[in-house]
Image (cartoon, rainbow, N blue to C red):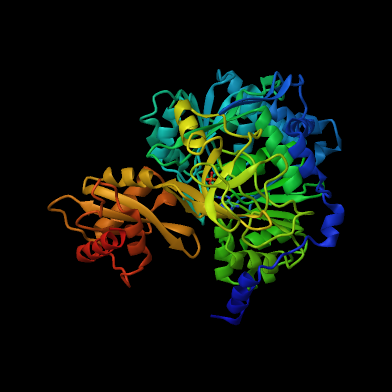
Amino acid sequence: MSPEGKALEALLHENRVFNPPQAFVEQANIKSSEVYGFASKDPEAYWAQAAGRLHWFRRWDRVLEWDYPKARWFDGGLLNVSYNCLDRHLDSWRRNKAALIWEGEPGDSCVLTYRDLYREVNKFAAVLRHLGVKRGDRVTLYLPMIPELPIAMLACARIGAVHNVVFGGFSAEALRDRMNDIGTKILITADGGYRKGNIVPLKENADLALEQAPGVEKVIVAKRTGQKINFRQGRDLWWHELMALAPPYSPPEEMEAEDPLFILHTSGTTGKPKGVVHTTGGYLVGTATTAHMVFDLKDEDVYWCTADIGWITGHSYVVYGPLANGATVLIYEGSPEYPRPDRFWQIIAKYGVTIFYTAPTAIRSFMRSGPAHPARHDLSSLRLLGTVGEPINPEAWVWYYNHIGRQRCPIVDTWWQTETGMILISPLPGLTPLKPGSATRPLPGIVADVVDDYGRPVPPGKGGYLVIKQPWPAMMRTIYGDPERYSRQYWQRIPGCYFTGDGARKDADGYIWVLGRVDDVINVSGHRIGTMEVESALVDHQAVAEAAVISRSHAIKGEAIVAFVTIKDGIEPTPELANELKAHVVKKIGALARPEEVFFTAELPKTRSGKIMRRLLRDIAEGRALGDVTTLADPAAVNKLRQAYAAEEG
Ligand code: WT7
């Protein structure tokens, strides 16, 4: 182990605490811990005060109606999300402030002021209205990280349409299933997007998806890459041609607080992704407040969250939270490593980024490419760092602190989920002493705990389930088309609590250490993938009889997907077939779900009741007990292990 590695090891045992630097404390948005007391004594008053950050056409009648597990927040209130993110700022000096600073992967760039963004959103809202899109209609967005994506989201919000962003890395089939799940009428896509110097053929994927998505009437195509694409007369329309004809203003709909704002799919423990439904009032209150508190947003900041807008992080903390605060948001289209591993640091220096929010997987890959890359760039504009998506190992935390924040910047480790809509557990950067690897404490107004199967709190230091005990404004309201699954999966598992699916422990100071998923969900590079989804993709291949998917730890990605497959009689288990199966998963879901490894096995180890022994598979995949594992899992070895387990358990 290197000397630095040894120091980090020592640090782990030392349990060091990092206090916020005095200079940060003095200017912080939240300076006093009184807010915690106020929020816990009178949560409704606290959230009402938070709602006061927004513009309401009509004030709400009641802050919260809680009929377990159904919540209604700010009922009776009327507001519009695009009005809050745009129109409101035009009455102030912010009208000419940069709202979006955009940089494309090839190096092209543009700046949209709040006025510019307002005009584009108004025009696109008019386009959608002209095409017959109405309040409550669903609109799917399958776009790269270009300004058209936030413009289209805000335009949907303006007219009360419900957007459904599908991450550009998902496959045609994944796009098709999501569009059909929610009954989309309009798809907005682009010819392509840039990624690692290549073109992602979005329109080509969309065309495939549309073959089996008969409900889609119109397809709006933004021109990004300019390559040749198929265009279907009457169905496909160019973004720029529609915009050229659009009027500059389109009035915002007055939406009910509980009207849906968007649906975003996320993986669960079945083969079918869940359409998580978020609403208008509570969601914006939650994201706007937490963006202000956790990221300490100021008008002078250049704020950069590196998440793709196709994930919840991008919805809440690239688009809605920051824009509701009138912030300047940086958006970068491409890969962190293109054309060289220092692209992020070059962007930070170029635009003077002050707040930088990224994922542990990215930090670990920066660690691997070495500190010389950031060291070459002027990162002195940075004042706050953030992380999200998976547990951060203390080594990566300390590296981030030293080499990116240069020991000046607090790090906010923010725990939350697609379902929670907003950050729930996080330090407040001017207030909370930090412990590397811990998301620290629940935010004001949030009641979280670590409990056993019966909902009883476990003692400090013991592992248990992470649960949330009180409703919060940005919580999901339902799963689209499946309210029963909403109740069962989230609210009936542990009595009286919202079940997060995460394991955690609480230390003696009340700090929460999230340990990772306890269900059949894998977190690859901060992206959630259901083992069942990958299994169904595998058994869809004609050679496969049965498949079991598990995860094993991975130095960069956190977790990697490993598949155990039994194939049909008469088919050869070759390395070529393994590659073909990986490619099949990519075709069914997308590159993010590509198995790291496929092991062929004569049979899957099962208990007498037929349950797959996943722990055993995990041990094989991690190389425990078996030593080196080769591509073809040795059936004899599987049997031996199974016998060993049976003996241990019997
Ligand atoms: C799962 C949610 C909204 C964040 C992006 C991913 C894991 C998220 C942390 C963190 C430890 C974290 C959890 C959670 N997770 N943030 N700071 N520390 N784990 O959203 O796809 O809905 O996944 O990501 O396991 O349940 P998601």
- Answer above or below: position of 6 versus 129: below
Q: Which residue ends up furthest to the left in the rendered image?
A: 570
Q: Is residue 610 left or right of residue 26?
A: left
What x and y, as percent, mark residue 308?
57, 46
What x and y, as percent, mark residue 183?
45, 24
Residue at figure coordinates x 87%, y 55% from the top left: 26
What x and y, as percent, mark residue 319?
66, 40
- Res. 627 image quadrant: bottom left
Front residue of 74/118: it is 74
- Res. 619 image quadrant: bottom left
Front residue of 350/455: it is 455
- Res. 75 image quadrant: top right
- Answer above or below: position of 455 versus 480: below
Counting every numbered tag in the picture gives 0
Residue at figure coordinates x 54%, y 21% from the top left: 137
Residue at figure coordinates x 77%, y 62% from the top left: 19
Q: Is residue 579 left or right of residue 429?
A: left
Front residue of 501/369: it is 501
Q: Is residue 340 visible?
A: no
Front residue of 218/227: it is 218
> Which quadrant of the rendered structure holds the C terminus?
bottom left
- Answer above or below: position of 519 versus 190: below
Q: Is residue 517 visible?
A: yes
What x and y, as percent, mark residue 318?
65, 44
